[in-house]
Amino acid sequence: MARTVASFCRICEAHCGLQISVDDDDRVVRVRPDRAHPVSRGYACIKGAALGELHHDPDRLDFPQKKSSKGWQRISWQQALAEIGAKVKHLRRQHGHRSIGLYTGNPTYFSFQNALYSQAFLEALGSPNLFASHSIDVNNKLYVATKMYGLSLVQPVPDFKRLRFFVCLGSNPVVSQMSVVQLPHALAALQDIERRGGRVIFVDPRRNETAQRVGEHLAIRPGTDVYLLLAMLHVIAVEGSVDRVAIDRVASGLDAFVDAARPFPPERVAALTGLSADAIRELALAFAAADGAALYMSTGVNMGPFGSLAFWVLQGLNLLTGNLDRRGGLLVPPGPFDVLKLIRTLGLGGEDAHRTRVDGLRRVAGCFPVAALADEIRVDAPDRIRGLFVSAGNPVHSVPHSGLDQAFDELDLLVVIDLYRNETAEHADYLLPATDMLERSDYPISWALLQPEPHAQFTPAVVPPLAERREEWRIFSDLALACGVSPLGKTVLNALPHLNRLLRRLPGHLEITPDHLLAMLLRWGRKVTLEQLRTQPRGVLLPTTEANSFLGRRVNTEDGKVHLAPAELLADLPRLASEAERLAAEATASDKQLLLIGRRERRSHNSWLHNNRFIRQPHAPRAWIHPEDAAHRDIVEGDEIMISSEVGNIRLPAKVTSDIVCGALSVPHGWGHRKSGLRRAAALGGDNVNRVIPGGAQNIEPISGQAIMQAHRVNVDLFEPEQHPTETGAAYRESLARAVRAPSRE
Ligand SMILES: Nc1nc2c(c(=O)[nH]1)N[C@H]1C(S)=C(S)[C@@H](COP(=O)(O)OP(=O)(O)OC[C@H]3O[C@@H](n4cnc5c(=O)[nH]c(N)nc54)[C@H](O)[C@@H]3O)O[C@H]1N2
Ligand SMILES: Nc1nc2c(c(=O)[nH]1)N[C@H]1C(S)=C(S)[C@@H](COP(=O)(O)OP(=O)(O)OC[C@H]3O[C@@H](n4cnc5c(=O)[nH]c(N)nc54)[C@H](O)[C@@H]3O)O[C@H]1N2
Ligand code: SF4
Ligand SMILES: [Mo]
């Protein structure tokens, strides 16, 4: 029956409300922003509008497939489950529980059922070998929150509606809608701050697309934000003074925290960051004086060489200036039920004793750094990883030069659960087709603590699954049964004692769906029930977060105080001095390498929406280079340039622009689909920037395991085909020519 229903997008944190129109044959004919949605209020980006095309894309995986000598062959679910189950049983028997691993990619955390059932599956198999995309994204934030607040998911969110001073480091909200905070239509929210007479300041080596439309811009040298933040701390707490009594009441370690800033007065930091000492001082003083302010940082800094130190100083500055736990500053929403308690009970988000075999790396928020995965597959140990499941991820493409493509070929079993045959799937033995977000029910639980405007919404599946696609909860439950273990794992069952009791009383064959679990969790929270959410498809607003509801009350450290001087962070401080010396020397050197940085684009989402015909990405992106750096290398707009590092090289057309600082080069990730089942994406050309970014466990931030992906030194030259005769594939040149001809829509 033709119908239009309210649902919401789950591609990014914003979770925009959508109106989805479906015809008599269950074809999704139109997806529009929902004006009546209480939080997104009619905002959605082109990716959300493209969900219908995602659902009907002819390149989607529709059936289980098995790789054979003749290529991919369609098989039945029954065969796939039986063969995978037998293989896993054999590997565990021969080599132990640790021989099985799981990588969960970014879309996992946008699916209640995938997040829950995939991790429960691995736990049921008795293996700690869980790897997740957050170690190539935000591990620094998760680690620092564990150290300062006792749990990884305590990530104070700016109170955008009341803020008067917002400093945004390394984020481009117009394009990304930010990260680790739920803010649909970020541009409007930021413009409102200015309209209220407040200030918005972007710190970015690029005058990014947001800074072009709102606020002020400080053009910083890549990888140096930590020095800027320390200089701000210097101005505020070394040169100035803070309310010691108030701080000591809720936090410990103030002196050691402030001491970290002593070596970094603005005058010294000016030479490192490329900002003037006056600008740094003005920023610090204005921030401290503002009536309601927030410092926020995202991937531009997370992925840099000092992501953890930077986030630590940033959190401390928010607290020292009295902006943490106040209206108009930053708040810690409690969620629809006690999410922190649940996480604590599940053992996620704190610290555990598991370590990787090779480098002894710790898990952060329950997961090992994916940069270590290739080593854990190749290590000469009896229980090295031999069987791997990859769910909603594309690590071969998204992890810096990782050796994963070769390591995956050494596995005895690789199973990929995805919407597409992506680059990782090319190395798999089995492909299992998952449902997309229109084909499954959902509640955005991973983001429940990250809502400046607390809100609860549930969506049932909008359409039935096409072909033989299956929901992840069912895939993981069936896999568990085929492997001879219980579908929900011990931790989930123990965390929900009433569920455990219920299960024992139920006849054995009855299934517990994600909706059952959700109903139980919401009932426990007593704020809203699933029945209510079913009748209000746009969800309900939850009470606004109270000021003074976090500090001294919900901080999860042993003494209930915020830890301002965790030993692990203090121990990382010496790295700052050696890098400062290197930066100072490079600032005066001639013939410089450029610092490679990333960016995102509106019509793109990591590595997975380039195939979408509705989005119509016109061409692969260009590398931004400053006119002086270009002139120095005889590069003009549209020229093909070669970017090379110690690990590889890539080629892209250049965009010459003074919107990027001299000395930096900006290239987005996720591109260069050549070997995959994404036919349209492959035709767009482009190259994968992760081929020039050094990877592996040597290139992670030492304490959090976050892969370092910003500010690597690269050589940049005009590409001259006659000097590289083997590099000129006809197809590549053709796509490049197309890219240069097409109008730039960046
Ligand atoms: N150089 C560089 N590298 C980066 C970044 C960068 O800035 N620079 N950014 C990093 C960041 S922030 C992230 S989050 C990672 C992402 O890294 P990954 O999560 O490993 O990769 P994605 O490209 O997001 O791929 C997601 C996959 O999930 C599939 N998928 C989508 N929805 C579903 C679903 O509902 N179910 C299932 N089973 N599959 C689904 C898609 O088809 C796609 O193949 O990349 C990181 N890599
Ligand atoms: N359209 C679109 N939206 C997305 C995504 C996407 O791929 N496309 N991905 C989603 C995901 S997984 C994530 S994690 C979020 C990320 O969201 P954001 O963190 O906002 O990511 P970006 O949009 O890449 O913005 C990062 C900015 O950091 C700047 N930068 C680079 N290096 C440095 C540096 O050293 N210092 C400073 N201060 N800035 C630097 C870049 O120039 C860029 O403008 O976006 C999400 N939303
Ligand atoms: S901003 Fe775009 S991708 Fe993100 S939730 Fe909204 S519609 Fe989806
Ligand atoms: Mo991300």
Image (cartoon, rainbow, N blue to C red):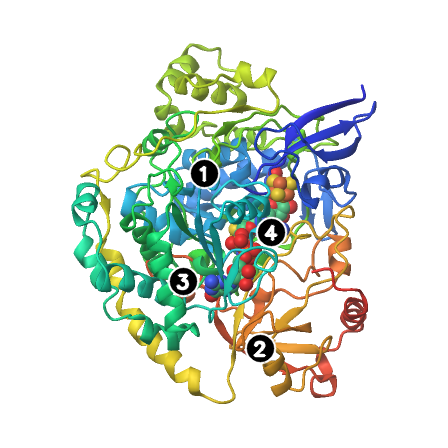
Label 1, label 4: how many angstroms apart (C-alpha)? 19 Å
- Mark 1 vs mark 4, foreground winner is 4
- Mark 1 vs mark 2, foreground winner is 1
Crowd class of label 3 (few under 14; some 14 to 19; many from 20; radius 10 Å): many
Q: What's the residue at 42%, 83% (across, down)?
A: 586
Asked whether the beta carbons under mark 1 and mark 2 sit within 8 Å of each other, the answer is: no
Which is nearer the eye, 494 or 599?
599
Label 1, label 2: how many angstroms apart (C-alpha)? 38 Å
Residue type (three-letter) at the residue carrying disc 4: Val
Farthest residue, direction bottom: 590
Label 2, label 4: how many angstroms apart (C-alpha)? 30 Å
Mark identifier at residue 450:
1
Asked whether the beta carbons under mark 3 and mark 2 sit within 8 Å of each other, the answer is: no
User: Can you give x and y, in whole percent of width and height, for residue 422 in the image?
Assistant: 66, 51
Which is nearer the eye, 562 or 303?
562
Q: Can you identify the residue that label 2 sits on? A: 644
Q: Can you identify the residue that label 4 sits on? A: 174
Vertically, is 671 above or below 111? below
